[in-house]
Image (spheres, rainbow, N blue to C red):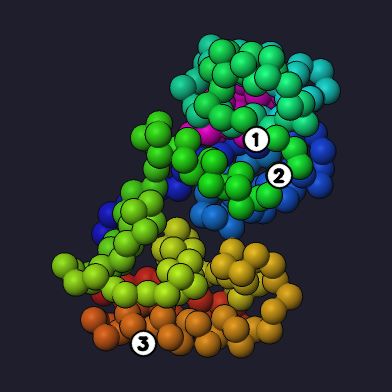
Amino acid sequence: MAVHTEPRILVVEDAEAIRVSVETALTAAGFAVRALPDGGELEQELSRFRPDLVVLDVMLPGRDGFELLRAIRRQSASGVVMLTARDGVEDRLRGLGDGADDYVLKPFVLAELVARVTAVLRRTGRTRPAVEVGDLVVDVEAGMARHGTAPVELTSTEWKLLSYLATHRGRVVTKTQILTAVWGYGDYADNLVEVNVSTLRKKLEAHGPRLVHTVRGQGYVLRSDAG
């Protein structure tokens, strides 16, 4: 099997509600995420965590986002997506001139932020590798799944479900985590997950052995029992 390495995202945002929601959305999208309330430990986290991309707020206590952006560029080639409530052209040009890869204006939709992060990772060559589970290959970035050379035809929802399971390959994910990642929030009935897992299983098992397993009382895991 190919070794799966999730892109690492460092979030620096002082507003707790925004920080938590961004961390949750990026984690649900399959990224490895750490979050800081300010830039006090930025340099240490750049060395310890080695992020592929930093989501960086502009208005921060202490050192602001522009100062932190310059610090990132002195130490790292990580992608940088800046968050700001300022919509002035001067601020955007300043950030882009200092090395930011993209700007997202507040308030923003979480799905847009995830898409912007993914786009920057793609442009900088830090995308997720294809995941191999037995004979199944799931290329999350290309939006393609195949068994050997045969493509697996999936609906949009089935693809989202498989992508999420693939980015967490070998790890058990709960129904609530799946609901949040695939449908956007976790207050649907559990049987919504069960029904879609069942249809996904049927399509995958038309090509080979079972790969989506139920872990009683915990959730589901994508793995090949063949190793």
- How packed mark 1 is, by other alpha carbons closer than 10 Å (few <14, some 14-19, many 20 or more), is many
Give the camera-side residue of 10 and 110: 110
Residue 108, numbered label: 2
Let me know if residue 39 is in the magenta part: yes
Tell me how far mark 2 sits from mark 1, CA to CA: 7 Å
Residue 140 magenta: no
Q: What amino acid type should be assigned to the residue bearing mark 1? A: Val
Judge from the rendering whether residue 123 lies leftward or rightward of residue 75; answer left or right: left
Q: CA distance from mark 2 to mark 3?
A: 37 Å
Mark 2 vs 3: CB contact within 8 A: no
Along the line of sight, the residue nearer the viewer: 3 or 58? 58
Query: What type is the residue that disc 2 sits on?
Result: Phe
Earlier sequence position, callout 3 versus callout 1: 1
Question: In this figure, which residue is indicated by the disc labeled 3?
Answer: 202
Residue 40, quarter of the rendered image: top right
Report which quarter residue 1 is drawn in.
bottom left
User: Which residue is rendered at x = 70% and y = 35% of the image?
Assistant: 105
Q: Nearer the viewer, mark 3 or mark 1?
A: 1
Is residue 216 placed above or below 127 in the rendered structure? below
Q: Which numbered marker is on residue 104?
A: 1
Q: Position of residue 16 (x, y in %)?
A: 81, 43
Q: Are the residues at dot 3 and dot 1 in contact (C-beta closer than 8 Å)?
A: no
